[in-house]
Image: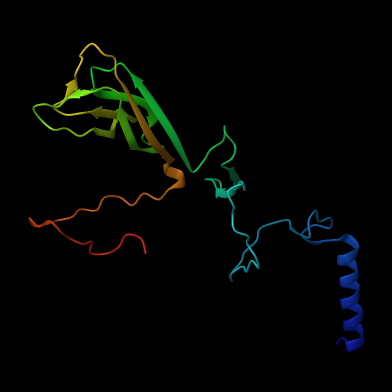
Amino acid sequence: MFSKRYLIILFLAIVSTVYAQNGVGIGTTNPRKTLEVAGDVNISEAIEIVQIDNLSDENTSTFLIQDDSFKIKALDVSNPTGAALGYIQEYVIYNPNEDWVLDFDTGISSTDFVLNTISAYYDRELDISQYSSIPYYSAFIRNGTWHIIADFPTANNVDENELGTWTISTLIYSRDLSKQLGTVEVLMDGKNAGAAANAIIK
């Protein structure tokens, strides 16, 4: 059994070693940081982080992502050529058939990505004298890629010789970096109001 004297000496020796190497190494005798663990780590309880400063507009943020081989990689969203959580892409489509874009193939894989059309506008005056019309634009999947459709139903250019332009903004995000919740089927029973049985996110 160690006496108290030997325990104090051992403790002082450990403390002096830590301060001498300016860091603690587990599985390594040459730590490069204040604490370096060379090997696997199994944490059975929570980790408490004392302080996390709020992000401000001028900050750039980096996410840590685990890949298929269980490696942790950094996802730097400020890198213009690297991967990101989401992408904003604007398509400017010149000279369609008057105001009608029946099928524009973006070439973006529907297996790897989800694409949403978030806004669209057309830059020519339309003839809506017989019917009122609101713009219709959407994304759909065909042959493994995302396609875009845009139109003012029952309307055409006032001047059919004018060359119109659709400007369509899209939001694209990777299926690897988002949770796909699937489809929720809702039976309204002829009513105009309803509610979900359970919230999909709480």
* x 87%, y 86%: residue: 2
Looking at the image, residue 70 sits to the left or right of residue 182; the answer is: right
Nearer-the-camera pick, 100 or 146: 100
Q: Quadrant of residue 38?
A: bottom right
Residue 170: tell me if it is visible.
Answer: yes
- Looking at the rendered structure, the number of numbered marks drawn on it comes to 0
In the rendered image, which quarter contains the C terminus?
bottom left
Residue 3: tell me if it is visible.
Answer: no
* x 26%, y 13%: residue: 162
* x 43%, y 41%: residue: 173
Specify the farthest residue to the top.
161
Residue 189, x across and y down, in percent? 8, 57
Using the image, determine if residue 5 lies above or below residue 104: below
Residue 11, x across and y down, in percent? 87, 77
Looking at the image, residue 129 sits to the left or right of residue 76; the answer is: left
Residue 137, x across and y down, in percent? 26, 33
Colouring mode (rainbow / by chain / secondary structure / one colour): rainbow
Residue 121, x across and y down, in percent? 31, 30
Nearer-the-camera pick, 192 or 6: 192
Nearer-the-camera pick, 124 or 189: 124
Q: In which quarter of the image is residue 127?
A: top left
* x 46%, y 37%: residue: 87
Using the image, determine if residue 75 lies above or below residue 30: above
Looking at the image, residue 183 sits to the left or right of residue 55; the answer is: left
Using the image, determine if residue 121 lies above or below residue 191: above
In the rendered image, which quarter contains the N terminus?
bottom right
Q: Quadrant of residue 15?
A: bottom right
